[in-house]
Image (spheres, rainbow, N blue to C red):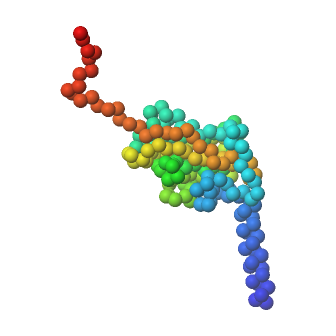
Amino acid sequence: MTLSLKKIAQTIFLAVLVATVVHGSPNGAPRGACRSIYPHHGDAVSQDIEDSTYELDVSQLENDGGYRPGKKYNLVLSGSEPFRGLLVQGRHGNTPVGKFTVLPRTPIKLSACTPPESAVTHSNSAVKNNVQLQWTAPSKGTGDVIFHYAVVVEFDIFYATMKTKIIKEWQEPAKQSPDQDTRPATR
């Protein structure tokens, strides 16, 4: 009797494990996707990112002349087609930087990535047309930031390892010393 109960328990465990792998992560990207920004959806492979219509709009940072350390910025992930899942993380090189805040009534949550608050993911698999994100820039001296992101359209249709352009750290204009004369030289 004990042997058959053990077999039943093993069968149930395997069924749950297979269901998780086959159905992906409807409640957000797992920790394992953090480093690669790549959904592990069975045998499915990423679509060519050159064909992607999805974009993470970082224009607020660009309009500010780069990110200002400690300032909060709104980013928008959108595309010409609805999507179901996402994973977004700001990085300097391979190091996660900045912190995300979950805004009220948005279908996102903080991811399981390390450090905490360094990335956001979807909180459900409902269809999304766009998602607003709030990111707090890292401390002064961090350097350039690139946002890495993935978008899941359907379980087997996704775009992974996409990146924004480089976002520079805002630099305060150099102050002119009072003894510098900037008038044109006269003859």
Residue reaching furthest to the top: 187
Q: Which residue is the extreme one toward the front?
A: 187
Split into 4 quadrants, where in the image is the C terminus?
top left
Q: Is residue 72 left or right of residue 83?
A: left
Question: Visible in this render: residue 126?
Answer: no
* Residue 109 shown left or right of residue 25 in the figure: left
Q: In this rendering, would 168 be left or right of 41?
A: left
Q: Is residue 108 above or below residue 10?
A: above
The number of numbered badges drawn on the structure is 0
Placement of the N terminus among the 4 image quadrants: bottom right
Q: Residue at x 73, y 52 (%)?
A: 45
**As drawn, which residue projects farthest toward the left?**
179
Name the residue: 57% across, 40% down.
Answer: 164
Residue 142 % position (x, y): 42, 47
Q: Image quarter for residue 182? A: top left
Residue nearer the viewer, 128 or 148: 148
Q: Residue at x 38, y 45 (%)?
A: 140
Q: Quadrant of residue 181?
A: top left
| Percent of width and height locating residue 157 | 74, 48
What residue is drawn where x is 61% and y is 54%?
36
Above or below for 29 versus 66:
below
Location of residue 133 with respect to 13 vertically, above or below = above
Is residue 144 in sight in this rendering? yes
As drawn, 65 above or below 184: below
Of residues 109 and 88, the one nearer the viewer is 88
- Residue 22: horizontal and vertical position, in percent? 75, 61
Q: Position of residue 179 (x, y in %)?
A: 20, 26
